[in-house]
Amino acid sequence: MPNKHIKVTVLGAAGGIGQPLSLLLKLNPHITELALYDVVNVPGVAADLHHIDTDVKISCFMRPENKEEENKPLQEAVKNSNFVIIPAGIPRKPGMTRGDLFNINASICAELATFIALNAPEATVLVISNPVNSTVAVFKEIFVKHGVFDAKKLFGVTALDHVRSNTFLSELIEGTLPNHYDIPVVGGHSGHSIVPLFSQSKGDVSLKILNDENILDALIHRVQYGGDEVVEAKQGKGSSTLSMAYAANKFFNIVLNGYLNLKITELASYIYLDNAIPGVTELKRDLKPLLDSQHLEMPEFLATPMTYGPDGVAAVNYSWVKAMNGKEREMFYIATDFINQNVEKGVSFVKA
Ligand code: NAI
């Protein structure tokens, strides 16, 4: 096992996602220190996790009442972090879209991004707070302002869409289990911006599903709006928390394995398409004629499959662009339009 000090900080650690995610991270043999920060309730979560007999050291930070001391805990929490994972913010209630969360969560993200820029400028940052399509743009703008932006190290966590795709597909194909599949999901992370590429599964997807328009449409809709199933079932008491914690942990482990040079795995996440990232120029080259044909702007951010290494993104996989079938291309056009609007919202928020 590599003997490297790894500090992971969870911002929003006392929340519905933060708690189970912190539990999963406490079980991770590669983590040295797990710093938990929240504006409420975090001492109880930390005390509880502290009793678990794994080697991960728990440290706990909460915003104090005293305004003068307000900044210290957050500074200490993020200082020297290798990874900062952010499930801070408010979740959806029935009838709400992820866009409805924008104003509150964008303010929270802007504040947290500023502290990360000042205290852990080298950290790899995983953003869970919704609406991811916009909040990641908020992070980028704040990091740019502070001169610390590195596109290889800022991720919007979209892994739940991939997890749901695998699960929902396996339910439709008798005799298969979710881990039979590895569905790439591109685009963004809300409703129609989510584009599952069932035709490009690593597990063999039955042609019966791919050729039956009704079954495929229902499956795609279920992936795009799967979060609503949980929001409705919880009846106003939260959105996806356990499955999200699982998905975030799955994604984090893939990024960590790349960081530690242990294992290379491909999984999509939502990043800024910086030409310096291997594969991005080719991705844009292949996307351009498609988008031009629809008079669509090239998205600045996109969820695309990629691999991860010691410096964050290792390389973007662009082979999916040419492999998209007609239906997937149509979905991608709709997604691009949404993403461009959502990114603009995040950018304008910071500029204003
Ligand atoms: P929650 O309300 O249970 O927890 C959020 C936590 O953030 C709370 O403990 C709250 O005190 C904390 N918080 C609020 N302001 C803060 C600040 N300034 N600094 C630090 N912590 C702060 O919400 P839940 O269910 O854990 O969801 C969190 C976020 O994750 C929501 O925005 C939700 O929409 C999003 N989400 C994202 C998913 C994805 O796939 N990326 C999936 C599901 C939810």
Image (cartoon, rainbow, N blue to C red):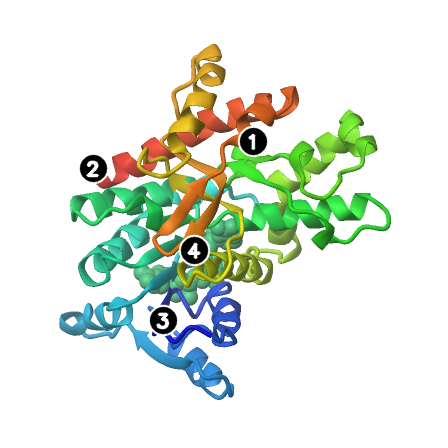
**Which of pointers 3 and 1 lies earlier in the amino acid sequence?**
3
| Amino acid type for the residue under numbered disc 2 | Lys
Q: How crowded is mark 1: few (under 14 residues within 10 Å), some or many (20 or more)?
A: some
Which residue is under mark 2? 351
Circles 4 and 3, Cβ within 8 Å, touching? The answer is: no
Q: How crowded is mark 2: few (under 14 residues within 10 Å), some or many (20 or more)?
A: few
| Amino acid type for the residue under numbered disc 3 | Ile
Q: In which quadrant of the rendered view does residue 132 lie?
A: top left
Mark whose residue sits in front, 4 or 3: 3
**Which of pointers 4 and 1 lies earlier in the amino acid sequence?**
4
Q: Eyeballing the image, is 339 above or below 145? A: above
Residues at marks 4 and 2, CA–CA distance in whole angstroms: 23 Å
Q: In which quadrant of the rendered view does residue 274 lie?
A: top left
**Do we see residue 227 in this rendering?**
no
| In the image, the residue with mark 4 has its CB under 8 Å from the nearest atom of ligand 1 | yes
Q: Determine the residue positioned at 51% across, 39% down.
A: 190
Residues at marks 3 and 1, CA–CA distance in whole angstroms: 34 Å
Circles 3 and 1, Cβ within 8 Å, touching? The answer is: no
Q: Eyeballing the image, is 29 above or below 299? A: below
Q: Which of 9 and 201 is in front in this view?
A: 201
Q: How many labels does the image show?
A: 4
| Amino acid type for the residue under numbered disc 4 | Ile
For ligand 1, the image quadrant comes to bottom left
What secondary structure is found at the residue carrying circle 1? helix
Q: Position of residue 114 (x, y in %)?
A: 22, 55
**Which of pointers 4 and 2 lies earlier in the amino acid sequence?**
4
**Do we see residue 262 in this rendering?**
yes
Which residue is under mark 3? 6
Which residue is under mark 4? 90
Res 320 label: 1
